[in-house]
Structure formats: C-alpha cells, structure tokens
Image (cartoon, rainbow, N blue to C red):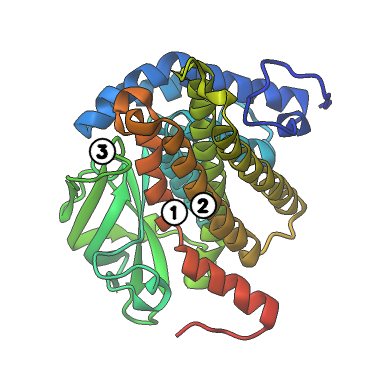
Amino acid sequence: MTTTMEPLGDQLAADFYAYETLLPDEERKILLKARALMRDEIKPLVNANWAKGEFPRELVGIFRDSGLAGLPYEGYGEHRPAVSNLLSGMLAMELSRTDASVATFFGVHNGLAMYSVHSGGDQEQRDRWLPEMAAMDKIGAFAMTEPLGGSDVAGGMRTTAEREGDTWVLNGAKKWIGNATFADYVVVWARDVDDNHVKGFVVEKGTPGFDPAKIEGKIAFRIVENAEITLTDVRVPEANRLQNINSFRDVAEILRATRSGVAWQALGVMAGAYELALDYARERRQFGRPIGGFQLVQDLLVKSLGNITASWGMLAQLARLQDAGVFRDEHSALAKAFVTARMREVVAWSREIFGGNGILLDHDIARFFADAEAIYSFEGTREMNTLIVGKAITGRSAFV
C-alpha cells in the first residue's frame, strides 16, 4: 500500500495538519467510504431518533451493507488483512463526527464485543461467532458495569458465576449496557465464586433468566439503547466461556484497546462540533457582518482547532504504539483523560458560538454538547485514568 500527501477527497476543516494523509491510500478510501455513508445515509436519521430516544433498527442493515464491520480482525470481514489501528481510530472519529450515539452502537459491536471474542476466545470460538458478527448478521454487546459499581469493577464485581459440571450459572445485574435490548450475543463478565477471578461468558439472546430493560430518561446518547440487565440463574455452557480469560488482568488487555477507541470518539465529537460552529460563524450575521469576522468568535474557533490538532497528534502516535506492539495501559489512559477533557472545552465553545440557537436540536450542536458528557464519563473517568498514568510515571499507587 502507498501513502500520498494528496487528498483523495475534500480535506476536513477540522484536519488542519492533514493527519488523514498518514493513512495508506487503500485505507483512506475506506475512511472516505465511511464519511459518505454517515453523510448520505445515516445523518438524515439522527435528530428525529435522538429526540424520540429510539434506536433506528435500519442502522443495522445500513452498516451490514457497508462492509465496515470486522476490519480490525485478520480473516474476518470484507477487508481480509486486518486494517491498521490508525484507520480503526479514524473510523471511530469519523462516525462520531456525525453522531456519537451511532458511533457507540457500532463501537460496542465491532470493538467491545468482537474484540472480547477475538482476544478472549479460543480459535473455535472466534470461528463460531466472529464471521456472523463481522457480517452483522448477529449483533454484540458488552456487559461489565454494574448498578452499584463503576471504577471499582476490578475488585468489586458483584455478578457471580458458579460452575455446575459443564454449565455455569450466572446471577447478578449489569447497567448501562449498550445494544443489550436487541443484541444476539452479550459478553457478560462475572466473578467465579470458586477462585474469585473475573471470567467472560457469551450469553445468547433468549437465554432464560437474562432480562434486559431499556434505560429511559437519558440526556445523552439517546439513540443508544442502554439496558439494565438482571441475571437470574442464567445457565451458560462451558463452551460459551471465553477460554483465554482467566482473571481481570486478561480483561484489562481488552479495556486498554477499547479505551483508546473512546479517545478517538471524543476527537470525532470535537471535530464535528467545531465544523458546525465554523459553518455557523461564516453564515450567521450580526451588526451587518458574519460573526466569524469578530475577534472573540475567532478566538473560540482557534482554541477549538488547537485542541483538535493536539489531540489528533496524540492519538496518531498512540495508534503507532499499538501497531508496534508496545502499547501500555498508561498510554490509553492518558489519551482518554486528555482528549475527553479537551472535547468538553470544544463542545462548550462551539455551542457558545451558536448563542441561543445552540440549545436547538435543529442546529445539531446541542446533541454534541449533551453526548460529550457521556463520553467524558465512560471507559474510566478522568480521575481514574489520571491515577493510572500517575502510578506509571511515579512508581507509586495513589488508588484508595
């Protein structure tokens, strides 16, 4: 594959340093395909469903036809050689640049669920589940967070798994589980009562005792169908236990990769919000001229662009570390903490440029402003990611 500095399509206003040109030409074409898909087929669905708090089921078919699922996994999906981590990140960015809820639906399936099977399963399990997940004939979900737990999940998981011969019996509850109301396969994490280690189980749709209930009343990610799951004597065969997961240390390998994906998602939200604000500043007239000609508006736009450019550079190097196999927990933790904090600033400044119109869904920016709060909080809070990095650089743990 070759890489050129010439754009294959229109350069994004948010890509001031032309980071997109770091991709080989073949991968840039995939990115442009995703950009066109989001613009032409998905964006028209977003606001109405965000307002209703409903997931448009036609999204599954749209993504199925796109061939974008399964790209990071060698031998699965339409692009048989695994694509680079840089393209995977930029795809998460591109989807979020249009809508963070849609990006989360896809990321939960293509990232959290599929990566759990790919990383935590043995070859038989990969071959059993990943082809139909890559084809999006089956949809995945990832159930770790619990109603009474969050950052303490490593040692405080309350959902239990007890082995009875060749069957495991799961009991407990999970919360905030995206896609779980309609997913075919839900990766459920539970603590083995015998050895006290966390293990992973693929629970198939319709299993008795598995009861997902849609969470209502959200102010963010309203398109995502998050569920609170009750597990009552859910019986799962040993064949559905992820064979390469034997402790939370193995789970952490999965979270390390997915946390970097959330940072890319935050970059996409920044980029989308900035581009909306830039277009608005060029068109909105006050005092007889476009507001983009006023110094204070330009200041907000330039600060936003600086945050985007700095974050993009950090994430591009993070992807190189992943591709080189020298990627560590503290690398993804720093990216998640830093980029989501910068995202919060950018969506606030962008909404400010819209003035009163910034609270109207018609202008899109209100959706970005609200969805940013969810991204800021999940996959490890800023505080917890800060402590991961702090321990790495000082050699001393500050965790309580």
Mark nearer the N terminus (3 vs 1): 3
Neighbor class of circle 1 (other Cα within 10 Å; few <14, some 14-19, many 20+) is: many
Compared across the picture, whether 221 is left or right of 302 comes to left
In the image, what residue occupies the spot 72% across and 16% down?
8
**Which amino acid lies under the numbered mark 2 shown in the image of this protein?**
Thr
Please tell me which of labels 2 and 1 falls first in the chain.
2
Residue 353, image x, y percentages: 46, 33
Q: Amino acid at mark 1?
A: Tyr
Q: Which residue is mark 1?
A: 376
**For the point 42% across and 74% down, which residue is it?**
154
* Residue 182 numbered tag: 3
- CA–CA distance in space, label 3 to label 2: 29 Å
**Up/down of 291 relative to 165, above or below:** above
Residue 127 x, y percent position in the rendering = 51, 42
Q: Which mark is drawn over residue 210?
A: none
Residue 176: image location, x then y, percent = 29, 53
In this orientation, does residue 32 appear?
yes
> Tags 2 and 1 in contact by the CB under 8 Å rule?
yes
Closer to the N terminus: mark 3 or mark 2? 3
317 to 238, vertically: above or below: above
| Dot 3 amino acid type | Phe
Secondary element at tag 2: helix
- Give the residue at mark 2: 340
